[in-house]
Amino acid sequence: MQAQERQFQDFELERYQSLHEHTVQFNLADSSVKCVGTREWLDAGEQEDLLNTGLFYPQVNGTQLLRTRIAALYPGASADSVLVTVGAAQANAMVCSALLSQGDELVVVSPGYRQVWGLALNAGCVVKEAPRDPDQHWRLDLDQLESLISPRTRLVSIVNPNNPTGSILSEVEVDRIVAACARVGAWLHADEVYASTEVADGVRARSFWGRYDRLICVNSLSKAYGLSGLRVGWLVSAPAMIEALWRRHEYAVIAAAAPSMTLAAIALQPEKSAWLIERQRRMSRAGRALLRSWIEASSGLVSVAPSAATCLGFVRYDLPINSYDVAERIREQASVLVAPGSYLGAEGHLRITVGYDEVKVSAALDRIGSTLRSLRRSG
Ligand SMILES: Cc1ncc(COP(=O)(O)O)c(C=O)c1O
């Protein structure tokens, strides 16, 4: 039988970035801090480890050393609970591939990173969106979320801390989400790539790990560790689910890259990971201070809700123009790339990443400000 043609849902945010990020002077549309250069974080012995990496196909589910180091981050997990992927992006795609079929229902959160949303639409699923409230510092409306979860729900997908708002779920909220999934036996997908990007000292987002048996946790080295170019991520779940995900992984990519896995294992050594995470948080804090000053000086043209994590500002602008048009004007007039809020599920906003060199971030924010003021004058 001929498969029915379905309109393909582009991954709009990633499409916009891949089209334009290499042609602008300042790219503030990404979501990690400025990534660390290879020479900057490897000592002579580690550089030697990299050069000694063989270039035959590596272990398909991830090297034993790397899976062991990842498992150590999840109490009670073993190397058999882990599958190494090409970034969290591939991990999320494997979750959809293993769990979703045409007609299945799932619940996602909006605004959010719309990968699972788009993959599910393309698979012919019914996607329900639980809203975050812009007037309540983007708090997730848990009553709404609970009302969307029913015996028909196959999957609930949560990103914590959230992209783009930087909100963190409280312990109580985490427990309520788990309880709602457990009531109907839904799978819970927890994308935790922004864990360890919390800004305040001593504040940590609670992982979903260990709270539920039908749980798949995803993370990567892209955000907290500032190593997005390695393209290393992972899935952690019960070994039987890992087997099912691994079968999809063989079709999709066979394995993550061997040199990347060597470097990933180095990054996850305790001292090295502490250094990388501290570097990321330093850049993020400095960028947030610049963003705050810029907003304060804007006379109400832009505003941002306080957020607890990430190097992202989800900036609201006071103009009656849609976010794609505003982003395009900023790109064309100022040669700065920012992400339109509509691509994350919230009009009237721009997502601006501030964890880069301070001089560059300042210059780019000035340019964005000039463009917004010119739009206000002409509007
Ligand atoms: C919530 C979320 N999940 C996954 C990804 C993909 O990350 P990775 O670089 O690990 O593939 C991103 C990237 O922006 C993200 O924001």
Image (cartoon, rainbow, N blue to C red):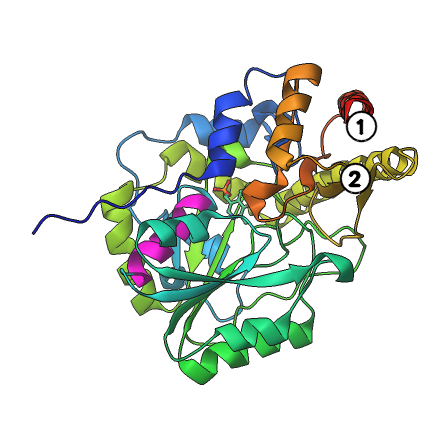
**Label of residue 376 in the image:** 1
Q: Residue at x 32, y 65 (%)?
A: 104
Task: Establish if 118 lies above or below 317.
Answer: below
Relative to 354, is 128 above or below? below
What amino acid is found at the position of numbered circle 1 in the picture?
Arg
**Does residue 117 appear in this view?**
yes
Which range of residues does the magenta coloring cover?
89-100
Instruction: State which quadrant residue 135 falls in.
Output: bottom right
Give the mark, 1 or 2, whose residue is nearer the N terminus: 2
Q: Position of residue 335 (x, y in %)?
A: 66, 16
Between the C-alphas of marks 1 and 2, the distance is: 9 Å
Q: Is residue 211 visible?
A: no
Q: Which residue is mark 2?
A: 318
Q: Amino acid at mark 2?
A: Asp
Q: Quadrant of the C terminus?
A: top right
Q: Tell me if mark 2 has few (under 14), some (14-19) or many (20+) residues whose alpha carbon lies within 10 angstroms of its own.
A: some
- Give coordinates of residue 131: x percent, y percent: 60, 62
Q: Give the SS element for disc 1.
A: helix
Where is residue 171? Give x, y as percent.
Answer: 67, 73
